[in-house]
Image: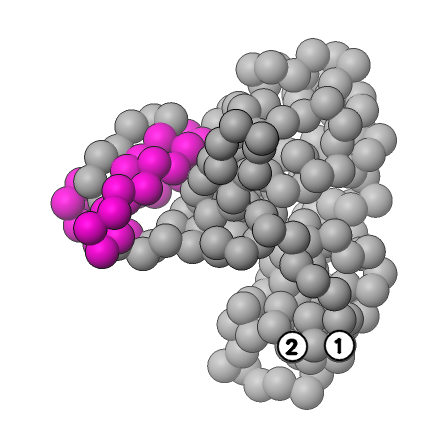
Amino acid sequence: MQLPLQAMITFLEGILIEAMPTHVVIGVHGVGYHVGIPLSSYDKLPVQGHQIKILTHLQVREDAHVLYGFMTAAERDLFRLLILHVSGIGPKTALDVLSGISVVQFKAAVVNNDAALLAKTKGIGKKTAERIIVELKDKVGVAAAWEAASAANAPDPRITDAVLALISLGYKQVDAHKAVKQVSEKGDATFVVEDLVRGALKLLI
């Protein structure tokens, strides 16, 4: 399977030149990259002038190539789920969602059919909130249920994050979970989420 162009620039690592609530400028080998961010990532930024590594998503339009950045994989995964799987939601609205609600709260709202909570987010009306629940429930349901479970019964959080990452790339939840479980069972405690995703991709491609 060939990954979409949006997945080709997966992160930027350089110096944080400018930091605003809506965007950052990152200097990488003499080039300044303008990257749109949600408030959730703004709160996690290092001090201006310091080294930064930010996960990215490249949106290709007819008139421009736009970079969006996230300080955690969970934020980027949710952003991708929204723009790729919910009709009528573009990057700006997806950033508004991440700016107004945490990833955990969002997933809980979807699982619990809480359209009222989602509708409080800027740019999201009641009808859009209901559409989000319908179109994403199957994709976030299992992961959210895992997170809501007690620590004693919940599976390894690395598995949850890896499954969500694969779903955001377009894989079905059942296939993603099966592949990640296979990799985790053959791996060891030192495996991180990226290891699980890479191993699962080899099984899925």
Q: In the rendered structure, which segment of residues is drawn in magenta? A: 23-52
Quadrant of residue 124 within the rendered picture: top right
In percent of the image, x 68 and y 87: which residue is there?
A: 186
Q: Is residue 58 visible?
A: yes
Relative image position of residue 140 (x, y in whole percent): 74, 45
In percent of the image, x 37 and y 53: which residue is there?
A: 12
The secondary structure type at the circle numbered 1 is helix
Which quadrant is home to the N terminus? bottom right
Mark 2 residue crowding within 10 angstroms, few (<14) / some (14–19) / many (20+): some
Q: Looking at the image, do the residues carrying marks 2 and 1 touch, with CB atoms under 8 Å apart?
A: yes
In percent of the image, x 65 and y 77: which residue is there?
A: 199
Q: Residue type at mark 2?
A: Gly
The secondary structure type at the circle numbered 2 is helix
- Residue 64 is one of the magenta-drawn residues: no
Which residue is denoted by mark 1 in the rendering? Answer: 203
Which quadrant is home to the C terminus? bottom right
